[in-house]
Image: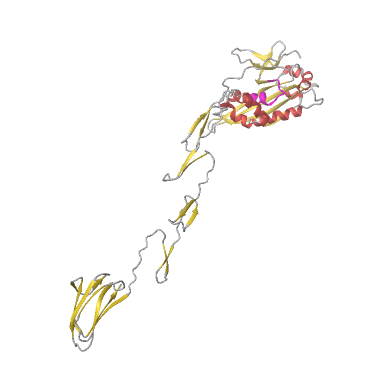
Amino acid sequence: MGITLPTVPAYYASPKLEYKIAQNIQVAFDSGLGWLDRSYHIARVGIDASQKSTYPQIYKNDGSKEHFDIRPDSSIGAYSFFEIDRPFVANKYENTLSCFFNVIFWCNLELVDPAKAYDYTSELISEVLDVLASQGAIVTETETRPENIFNNYSSLQQELKQHLMRSYSGFKITFEVPTTLNDTCGDVVIDSCEQNVARINALPTSVKNCVIAAISDCLDATVENSDSSYTASVPSGDTLVLPDIDIVNSNSSFTTTHPAAKDYTIPNLTLSNSDSSYSESIPSALNKTLSDIQVTDSDGTVSAYPAKKNYVCTPQVKSTFLNFVFGIGATADFTTTIVSGEEGVYTANTLTNISSPVYYKNAAVVTLPITLVVSDVFRITGTITNTAIEARVKLTGTY
């Protein structure tokens, strides 16, 4: 085979539509098929006027109008090129784009893997199908019959037996790539993370690792929290250590620092009274209803009462009395100093053989009711009715 395959032309800087999709897959072939020596873009039909035949040709992509002849070259292991199978279909109302391709592979099996002494074309096809699937391609046909692989090029039809005889092989895969019309991924540039990240993530792991190793000058990443109150720009490949967060309660009586993006369990709070006779651990931020306290009256009566609420005791009312006795022939005039147990409020009197009693408290005349406290000087006078018998004055009241 007298053709010497040229070096693959440079990638298009800003391909559009089917050219963009084909270049995406071309990049994936370059990264994912280690046995592929040349991966060309979309070929056109070249015309050899002297031979009245056609052949596949590829644009040099150097600003000129020149094209390369890319018929099989027996000195290389394998090469591929794309064909437009039929016009693309775009729907701007639904924002959809479907492009239709053939991709043709020609291989010298002895050069691709000299260790294999059998026809392993199907193994190569399987690898190509994996890469196409990673690019969202829908394969509709895989052709291995020699007469249908280069059927668009009459010169290769004439040389078909030579190009596909043992140990040469070839195959053609027909596929569709559905995508969006206004694809925002950007043009494919092999050293741009922004334009390749989605495609790289979809690649098989081994292919993905190869692509990542080849990528440089990635864009900075932006790290932010859910409400964008924190944001930071991180150069690609660098490590960002998030600053600790402060955890503070509503009155700032509790504060602590904690690693960001890590769950934090708020410690329980301890609820206790002033002498620690009551103590309870409860979850933070939980409403807690304190149990009622028990109030025991002096008579042994027990009642429930809300905790943390002042309790006003009801005074205990008991009866008391003072008894004054005037002996036979005595004068009705008696003075005493009130001692403990005699204090109280005296509201009534019982008179026996005496009338018109007059009461004095600390030398001042008082009338019922009379309030007496310890140390008060109390005096009583009156008129005894019959001096032949004793007379009595009984004061009754409460304390």
Q: Is residue 242 above or below residue 374?
A: above
Residue at 71 percent of width and 10 percent of height: 50
- As drawn, which residue projects farthest toward the bottom? 388
Magenta stretch encompasses residue 203: no
Q: Which residues are magenta?
A: 25-38
Q: Residue furthest top?
A: 50
Q: Is residue 28 highlighted in magenta? A: yes
Up/down of 298 relative to 350, above or below: above
Quarter of the image for residue 153 reads: top right
Q: Is residue 328 left or right of residue 172?
A: left
Identify which residue, 83 or 383, lies in the foreground: 383
Residue 375: image location, x then y, percent: 26, 69
- In the image, what residue occupies the spot 58% across and 26% down? 193
| In the rendered image, the vertical position of residue 390 relative to residue 302, given as above or below | below
Q: Position of residue 292 (x, y in %)?
A: 44, 62
Q: Is residue 149 left or right of residue 88?
A: right
Measuring from the top left, give residue 273's x and y in whole percent.
44, 56
Indicate the quadrant where residue 191 lies.
top right
* Residue 211 visible in image: yes
Q: Is residue 115 left or right of residue 213?
A: right
Q: How many marks?
A: 0
Q: Is residue 347 above or below residue 236?
A: below
Is residue 34 shown left or right of residue 273?
right
Q: Residue 150 location in percent, x, y? A: 72, 21
Q: Quadrant of the C terminus?
A: bottom left
Q: Which residue is drawn at the image coordinates 79% and 18% (left, top)?
A: 162
